Image: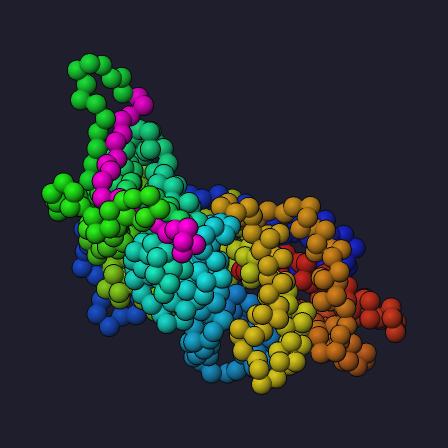
Amino acid sequence: MFRTNMRVCVLLLVIFLLNALPPKIASAAPPQLSEAPLVAKKPKAAPGKSLHKIIDEQIQSEYKDLTKSVSTISSDGEFLRRVYLDLTGRTPSITKTREFLNDSRSDKRAILVDQLLASPEYARYTSQQLDVILMRRLSKKYINVSTWEEYLRKSVAENKPLDQIVREIFAADGSNKETQAAARFYLARAGDVNELTRDIGKIFLGADLTCAQCHDHPDVNEWKQDHYYGISAFLIRSFVFTDKKKKQTVFAEKAEGEVKFESVFEVRDKTSKGAETTLPVVFNGPKISEPAFKKGEEYQVKPAKDVRPIPKYSRRAQLGVSITSPQNRRFARTMANRLWAMMLGRGIVHPLDADHSDNPPSHPQLLEILTDQMISHQFDLKWYLREIVLSETYQRSSANDLFNKKSAEKLDDSRFTHAIMKPLTPEQFSWAVLQATGYADIHRKSLKKKLTEESLRKKLLGYEKRFVTLFGGLPGKPVEGFETTADQILYLSNDGGIQGLVMPSSGNTADRVLKVPVDQPDKIAEELYLSVLNRHPDQTETEEVTKLLQGKAGVERSQMVSDLVWALVMSSEFRFNH
């Protein structure tokens, strides 16, 4: 666990930048394994055994002595902050923190997990995570971003199966008002077939097929050019169409058109057969044949000037069904791996879009089981996340005495023997700051009976958007990992909005700390640390808080308390979820 040197943090923001960098950890090469087949297997989990128990058995099975190989279970404070951030995108209030830390029930962690999964904050934050995965923070084009976000939020709130969400997205063309929002996946990419093909491979199939557009992949033997064009064939007939009368843009489709491709490495001559073509197909699955129509009878609505054509048979309509088919094991495997990485900081296959035999999973059997369970539980998102969070693997500490004795080079994140430090997402960072400074609680109180997750978010949405702008990366290129820019430094250190959060204001954190009697330094430090870091301070931290505030009064004391709140919020411990 990080410990913050508050005096240095107050004086030098540069220290924050240095401390915020996660340790560099070398990953050991996992054993070789051939690519998983696309044919679904029967679930291997023992009947009646919970998935979180199986996860722990699989992770721990390679170690004879866990005390020398695996980190201890996280403290209550560590777990509380982690699970709040991962399931709701924010940190808990000081009231909730005290309640949980003082709760003596043996099953309090499971109770908390179920409470968070049932909260509207869970639906909001998880849908934001899915949004980044699906849309890469692309800018608005044709479809209002807020309607898309609400579609995802509502889908998660209803616990709509993940494969159903994917089918709805691939089926939407923007013509139907009820399903229009889901068409953003196509339209935000301007219907570009190559961009869509690349993103579908990466997001849903765990395969970056970019290099296979021009030739068989040079580094991955099993990724072929016809894999790329098999996906493209679903989309080759589609195009963006704007109905000027209705002032509506949709993803239309023609009844004809085939993909044609040839390797740039192949020299053609007069005897060559020419460019190849393929029917729609997802990797090594069955090719999708289509009905034949007499010439002139291919359309329900024939193409004409300013008229949207509608074919009798839609190739694109087969895409979602083919991608999410139980026989397409690669989709279930990719989703299981992506969600695992979302919660634990890295995938069992990593990078997430490099699932091939030369980059085998760290735990092959576990990934097989997760895939089986994803299929057998019908892509139940909430169930799957719950099982991960209830596992000891998820609940392990990021560090303890055992791991502190090891050099960073000997720690291997791919083994999941300890919690991996994850930089806060922009959404997490914004709401964690608002909660830690007490600003969110002020607005909760002001809303009174009108308080809902939605009403509070509307009040504070400007802060979230500012953090996303500064920390989210460029549209189409979301930040992965941790990076620091000059704009971020200036915002966190000098912006009036941030300074206003840490200055004393009725009911916020600085105000509460100032109200603790000066002759109770332990209580002052406790109020400060429980509010910001959701844990009790250690003796050294308590002594330093006491020393910094000793002998100060009035404006000087108020300013020092504000500096302490700011220092903790700017600390590496706060900036990472660990």
Q: Camera-side residue: 458 or 406?
A: 458
Left/right of residue 469 with respect to residue 545 in the rendered view:
left
Left/right of residue 131 with respect to residue 467 in the rendered view:
left
Which residue is at a point 71% across and 75% down the rendered structure image?
A: 508
Q: Camera-side residue: 7 or 481?
A: 481
Q: Camera-side residue: 48 or 206?
A: 206
Which residue is at a point 37% across and 36% down the rendered structure image?
A: 210
Which quadrant of the figure has residue 46?
bottom left
Q: Is residue 114 above or below residue 298?
A: below
- Residue 302 in the image: state x and y as whole percent: 24, 47
Q: Is residue 451 magenta?
A: no
- Residue 219 in the image: state x and y as whole percent: 34, 31
Left/right of residue 522 with respect to residue 351 in the rendered view:
right
Q: Is residue 307 above or below residue 399?
A: above
Residue 34 in view (yes/no) = no
- From the image, give the main secondary structure of the stretch colored magenta: loop
- Residue 567 in the image: state x and y as whole percent: 72, 61
Which residue is at a point 52% across and 82% down the rendered structure image?
A: 103
Left/right of residue 115 with respect to residue 77 in the rendered view:
left
Q: Is residue 332 above or below residue 229?
A: below
Q: Magenta span covers which residues?
A: 243-265
Residue 356 in view (yes/no) = yes
Q: Quadrant of the N terminus?
A: bottom right
Which residue is at a point 87% across and 68% down the rendered structure image?
A: 556
Q: Camera-side residue: 197 or 350?
A: 197
